[in-house]
Amino acid sequence: MATGIVTTAFIDAARARIPDLRLLTDEVDRDAHRRDETSYLATGRPGAVALPTTTEQVAALVLLCGEHDIPIVPRGAGSGLSGGATGLEGALTIAFTAMDRILEIDVENLCVVTQPGVINARLKAAVAEHGLFYAPDPASFEMCSIGGNLGTNAGGLCCVKYGQTRDSVLGLEVVMADGSIIRTGGKNIKDVAGYSLTHLMVGSQGTLGIITEATLRLRPTPPPRSTLLAFFPTLESAGDGVAAIAAAGLSPVTLELMDRFTIRAVDDTHELGLDRDAAAMLMVESDLPGASAADELSRAEVACVAAGATSTVRSQTAAEADLLRQARRAAHWALEKLGEVKMEDVGVPRARVPDMLRAVERIAAKHDVRIGTFGHAGDGNLHPDLVLERGDPRGEAITKAVQADLYQAALDLGGTVTGEHGIGSARTEWMVRQRGADAIRFMHAIKDALDPQGLLNPGRVLPPK
Ligand SMILES: Cc1cc2nc3c(=O)[nH]c(=O)nc-3n(C[C@H](O)[C@H](O)[C@H](O)COP(=O)(O)OP(=O)(O)OC[C@H]3O[C@@H](n4cnc5c(N)ncnc54)[C@H](O)[C@@H]3O)c2cc1C
């Protein structure tokens, strides 16, 4: 693993070799690139922050870091929830804020070619002008970048129908640890030439290569969505509702869950008139055309009622559906009004959602803490948010204890410690327990082959050998 730090000699060499590069060296700027959204993690102050505008600048930086043995942290918008882009003391952070051009919208081939610094919402809006739709839809879509989405293989609200970020990637341009620039794919829908480096890079959190361009798959814009809300008297019946919708052969674009604590927080913030006494709510969206949407939601409603839903509500207009979706997206911020929030990201096989919800309740009672749970129930991916009183003296210790119980519960149910936020630096100690020592050994072999010097985001994703 690279152990050097940014020195005056490095800065001078970077300025001489890459004269047009913006390089931030002020303490204030370096501090601004220290954290992501995992506020509780210890971080380092970067030695410098580079803001490249071209792939060639990135490649030159990587070569220079190799010569000076300086670790590199690739960074998108810093909205990550696993500490993947947080600063390493004295290292170089390469922030992609200034590589923010959409290079081509190819209507004929239904794809877009983009630099990594483009914000997800801006890409969606740009392709929408051509009647096209970029599906990946993290709740943070107005703040996170395409590079970060690729780095984490971001999920979101419509994965249940359209898949995670990986499912919308056709090809990447990547700067490798030796400074070479490779292309892993292009505009071909089908392309099985060799190992899929695209799939290896997506989700590797900047540890195997630095993504400088992406060719992403688009779809024709689906019709505006309609929404069904179903309220359940128990968590278990809501879990049954999820299973019943799947069993009915339905494929809604969104199948989200909120528990009572989250319903109340969201309702307090947005005054939507939600059923505050329900134990859980499911939000089901359809983006099918014409009468098919109403039909899909009617069938989902029947499934929910059969599972025990006590009341249901349907959106009357597309604007109302948008409002409900915005409220769901803002669930995390609604909980933040109540205290200091630590968002978790466990996943379980869909049929085990009720078991995971029960485990969350048990864990909250055991530690005497408040946990608001919401998430992408259709994918079995839940976000239990630990909501601590601000200044709770149990702070870090209780966070660790709750996390450990949540992760173990998910693993016991055949699940995962992270469904979409990534291992980053927050969860490395759980990798062996989830994947097993042999799998980790092969992951280290891949890392060593692609980045023998350990330059790229060291200490993230993989536990120490
Ligand atoms: C309120 C809230 C809601 C959220 N909702 C969701 C959600 O629904 N679904 C979801 O998946 N996530 C969600 N997130 C988490 C976060 O927004 C995503 O992980 C997002 O993909 C991070 O993008 P970013 O641009 O902020 O990346 P960063 O946080 O800057 O980086 C994320 C990772 O990607 C790597 N990376 C960044 N750029 C590159 C590059 N060019 N090449 C290689 N690696 C790179 C970084 O090193 C890091 O490991 C949410 C976060 C918040 C705060």
Image (cartoon, rainbow, N blue to C red):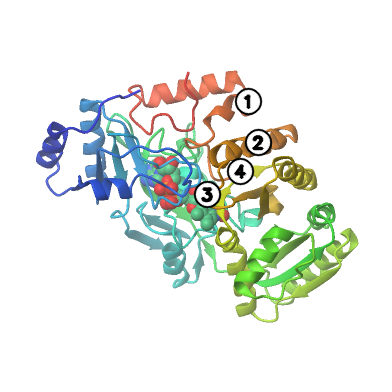
For mark 4, give the secondary structure: loop
Residue annotated with mark 2? 407
Q: Earlier in the sequence, mark 2 or mark 4?
A: 2
Residue 194's place in the image compared with 38, above or below, is above
Residues 129 and 4: in front is 4
Q: Amino acid type of disc 1?
A: Arg
Q: Earlier in the sequence, mark 2 or mark 1?
A: 2
Q: Which of the 4 image quarters holds residue 206?
A: top left
Name the side, left or right, on which 286 lies relative to 269.
right
Residue annotated with mark 1? 433
Marks 3 and 4: which is nearer the front? 3
Q: Is mark 1 within 8 Å of ligand 1?
A: no
Whole-Å distance between the Cαs marked 3 and 1? 32 Å
Whole-Å distance between the Cαs marked 4 and 1? 16 Å
Marks 2 and 4: which is nearer the front? 2
Please say if the residues under marks 2 and 1 sit with CB atoms less than 8 Å apart: yes
Residue annotated with mark 4? 419
Q: Residues within 10 Å of mark 2 (few under 14, many from 20)?
A: many
Place of residue 394 in the rendered image (x, y in percent of width and height, measured from the top left): 58, 41
Q: Amino acid type of disc 2?
A: Tyr
Whole-Å distance between the Cαs marked 3 and 4? 29 Å
Q: Earlier in the sequence, mark 3 or mark 4?
A: 3
Marks 2 and 3: which is nearer the front? 3
Q: Residues within 10 Å of mark 3 (few under 14, many from 20)?
A: few
